[in-house]
Amino acid sequence: MTEIRKGVGPGWLQAHSAPHPPYRIYLRGPSDNIVGREDFEAEGDEAAMVLARLLYQACNDVAQRFELWQGGRQVDAGSDATTALDALTTRIEEEATQLEERLRDSQWAIARSETLLERLKQRDRQK
């Protein structure tokens, strides 16, 4: 599993095995306002989109949609995103859980997402 740890700035991560620039998910509310944001590393666009979709699904009671960016480039969902989600590996699920926990512990409005909190409780019960 890729080791993830807090980096130099708030919200920035460094992954020891991922040489790619960080991705950023913006979670948007009903007024298209940003209700959450998180930076993370991924092995490529497909893996980043899978993580972004998992984060969005974990808190879609507060977030209405999401955007995924890498630097100044918006990452397109593409047609393979659903297939990639179906083929999700245990490693990526663990990374998604770490990101969900960080969103829960953040000061963003998204931290109050009941869907997010319930999802994390379910994962705790499965352990």
Image: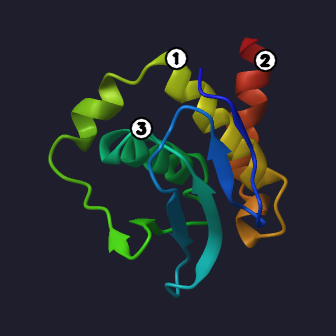
Answer with left or right where residue 35 lies relative to residue 106.
left
Tell me which numbered mark, 2 or 3, is placed earlier along the sequence.
3
Where's the C terminus, which quadrant? Answer: top right
| Cα distance in 3D space between marks 2 and 1 | 17 Å
- Residue 61 is situated, as x and y percent measured from the top left of the image, at 59, 59
Q: Which residue is mark 2?
A: 125
Horizontal and vertical percent for residue 32? 49, 84
Q: Can residue 115 be seen?
A: no
Q: Amino acid at mark 2?
A: Arg
When the figure is inspected, residue 61 is found, relative to residue 44, above or below; the finding is below
Residue holding disc 1? 90
Is residue 91 placed above or below 29 in the rendered structure?
above
Q: Dot 1: within a 10 Å radius of its alpha carbon, few (fewer than 14), some, or many (20 or more) residues?
A: few
Between disc 2 and disc 1, the foreground one is: 1
Q: Is residue 25 above or below residue 121?
A: below
Q: Residue furthest top?
A: 127
Given the image, on which type of amino acid does mark 3 rest?
A: Glu
- Is label 3 in a helix, a strand or a loop? loop
Going by the image, does 119 lie left or right of 80? right
Q: CA distance from mark 3 to mark 1?
A: 15 Å
- Residue at (35, 43) in percent of width and height: 44
Residue topped by disc 3: 43
Residue 44's mark? none
Dot 2 or dot 1, earlier in sequence:
1
Where is the N terminus found, in terms of image quarters?
top right
Question: In the rendered image of this protein, does residue 19 appear above or below residue 69?
Answer: above
Query: Picture coordinates of residue 16 (x, y %)?
Result: 62, 34
